[in-house]
Amino acid sequence: MADTKYDVLVLGSGPGGYVAALRAAQLGLSTAIVEKRETLGGTCLNVGCIPSKALLDSSELYARTKGELADHGITVSAPRIDLKQMHARKQSVVDKMVGGLGGLMKGRKVEVIRGTAKLAGADSVTVTGDDGERTLSADSIVLATGSVPIELPFLKFDGSTVVSSTEALEFDSIPDELVVVGAGAIGLELGSVWARLGAHVTVVEIMKDVLPGWDAQVSKTMRRELGKQGIEFKLGHKVTGLTGTKKKKVTVEDPDGNKLELPADKVLVAVGRRPYYDGLGAEELGIATDERSKRIVVDEHFQTSVPGVYALGDLIHGPMLAHKAEDEGVAVAEIIAGESGHVNYDTIPGVVYTWPEAACVGQTEEQLKEAGVAYEKGSFNFAANGRALAMTAGAGFVKILADKDTDRVLGAHIVGPWASDLISEIVTVMEFGGSAEDIARTVHAHPTLTEAVKEAALAVGKRALHSL
């Protein structure tokens, strides 16, 4: 087939890729996007963010119906789980999102090309699809092929017993015993889903607490609250393998070197993800990567070591988060169009969508102490928030950290109801270089969960009104 030339060619249609394509087209650049899946949206829309949140919502509704309705004076017969319908609803959410994305591509006149891409040069790509091989060329090529789960050498994925997050979204029955390896966001979220639905879930983490790298108070609170929901934690434990034929057991070492065996119908390995550019031809083209992380190295304009080839999202530095990739997609498109695209990596929030939720932005107390930064902190517990109590959601807190001299907000950490939404106010203030006083002086509606944010900001100045 004859060559086709574009201004921008995006490889991969996950959050970073599809946003880059949409923004490039919006800026008047002729744009195409290559995707090897049958559907657009990458891991996030198809087997990640969206389906996992659908299952989290379904399982949470079941757990609350089972455990809280009586307190509200509502009597119902014992709820039953229809897992097939739960999965069907999840898929309907995915289908709606994917269909909407296809409509956006069509509306913005972004050409969608199905097939597997390989770099043929700094300005050309070969795409192999059902209709054969096709050569495309572009002034700018954007690599946005995302990441894949990390596989442990002693716990190889088999798609049945030892699984990644992809298969853990599709269990056709509720496992009696689920062992989750890794206490990061993915492990805790999917562990929560199946624990709520009746599985006995054991989370094994080699570090001393859940959510390694998060604020220590967040980690401690999340461990306590999820433990109340029946999740068992083996912290500071190292997984060494899997034994048994019909009855599987995960072998584990405790901090003292003692051997343990954990029964497991399913083993979810959730120890992180790695950048995915296998078969893309990046190495052959001479695109530089970081030796340790294997991430693609880019400059301040997201350009790789090969001029005209850009990279973003999970392929490059920074947290592997969909919203981080989206902002990079906008920035890359704007830079290619001659504008000044920018991403502020200091204000990228992190969220764990369990219940309670956890959210953070900026620095932790531990990081500030290590850096020798003088700071003030203010905290407020949801147990003293009227809206949270009305929701039967009084667990958790809001904590704001501010520079001791300037009062500029340096970080914030939340465990509690809808922390994923509450963090946005603080992110906005930080983006504008604002202070705790700015939050404290802003009127917040009553009664709302947002008042906990205001009270934490007041507490930075030692003048909280609704706590001692």
Image (spheres, grey):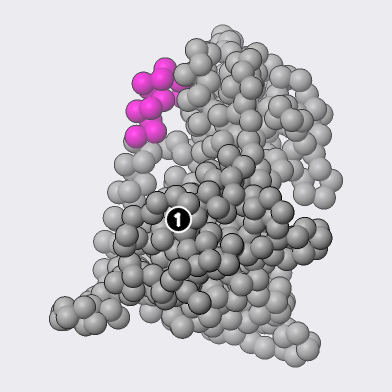
Q: Relative to 299, is 434 on the left or the right?
A: left
* 452 displayed left or right of 240: left
The residue that appears at 84% across and 46% down in the rendered structure is 291
Name the amino acid type tagged 1: Leu
Q: Is 31 included in the stretch rendered in magenta?
A: no
Look at the image and tell me whether residue 161 can be seen.
Answer: no
The quadrant of the image that shows the N terminus is top right
Q: Which residue is mark 1?
A: 422
Q: Is residue 80 left or right of residue 150?
A: left
Question: Quadrant of residue 413 in the image?
Answer: bottom right
Q: From which residue to which does the magenta span run?
A: 100-112
Residue 107 painted magenta = yes
Of 51 and 301, the residue lying toward us: 301
Res. 463 visible in picture = yes
Residue in view at x 47 percent, y 59 percent: 454
Residue visible at 52% across and 44% down in the picture: 428
Residue 268 % position (x, y): 55, 68
Magenta span: chief secondary structure: helix
- Residue 461 place in picture, x, y as percent: 59, 62
